[in-house]
Amino acid sequence: MHATALDHSFRLVTRRSDHAWTLTVSGDIDVETVAALCRALNAVDPRRGQVVVLDLSGVLFADASLVNALLHARSRGGPHHLVISALSPCVARLLRLTDLDALFAPRAIPAPPLGNSSPPDPPRGTLRLSALHR
């Protein structure tokens, strides 16, 4: 486990398994703190079948910087690369206000490749970032 603390209001904790990286973010995500999140998201190689499980339940404030980071991660890795496991009320509101909540749909995390006996245990209510057509 590796933790990065940029200041009192932002914290990013990463856990890595064979199949997924779990990123747990708390505090504020804005133009000053989003670079650490982007570096963590970009460290995961979607070509290896690795999944990013992103827990945003501890985020207290988020602006367009978070939206841009999520959209970039999705475009880089595709809809199966980024799994949002939890949203804080402010992140849910931001996605709703920007009309991006339609990009999130409840789905199961993909099973790990055969031979991997230790898949990550995501929290209940896992959401996957994926395009939906209304």
Image (cartoon, rainbow, N blue to C red):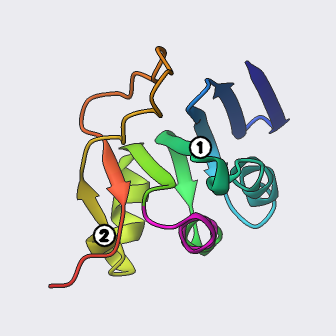
The image position of residue 116, as x and y in percent, is 50, 21
Assign the N terminus to one quadrant of the image.
top right
User: As displayed, is residue 24 above or below residue 28?
Assistant: above
User: As displayed, is residue 101 above or below residue 86?
Assistant: below
How many numbered circles does the render carry? 2
- As for residue 100 lying within the magenta part, the answer is no
Picture residue at 43% right of the left edge, 64% below the top = 79
Which of the two discs, 2 and 1, labels the residue nearer the N terminus? Answer: 1
Pick the front one: 77 or 31 = 77
Picture residue at 52% right of the left edge, 46% below the top = 60
Distance between mark 2 and mark 1 Cα atoms: 24 Å
The image position of residue 74, as x and y in percent, is 53, 67
Q: Give neighbour class at mark 2: few <14, some 14-19, many 20+ (Cα, 10 Å).
A: some
The residue range painted magenta reads 69-79
Q: Main secondary structure of the magenta part?
A: helix
Helix, strand or loop at mark 1? loop
The image position of residue 57, as x and y in percent, is 44, 39
Q: Quadrant of residue 73?
A: bottom right
Picture residue at 57% right of the left edge, 74% below the top = 75
Name the kind of residue labelled 1 in the image. Answer: Gln
Picture residue at 32% right of the left edge, 81% below the top = 99
Q: Quadrant of residue 5?
A: top right
User: As displayed, is residue 101 above or below residue 62?
Assistant: below
Give the labeled residue for mark 2: 101
User: As displayed, is residue 98 above or below residue 70?
Assistant: below
* Side of 11 where 25 appears, left or right: left
Q: Which mark is residue 120?
A: none
Q: Which mark is residue 50?
A: 1
| Residue that extends furthest to the front in the rendered view of this protein | 115
Pair 2/1: label in front? 1
The image position of residue 54, as x and y in percent, is 52, 43
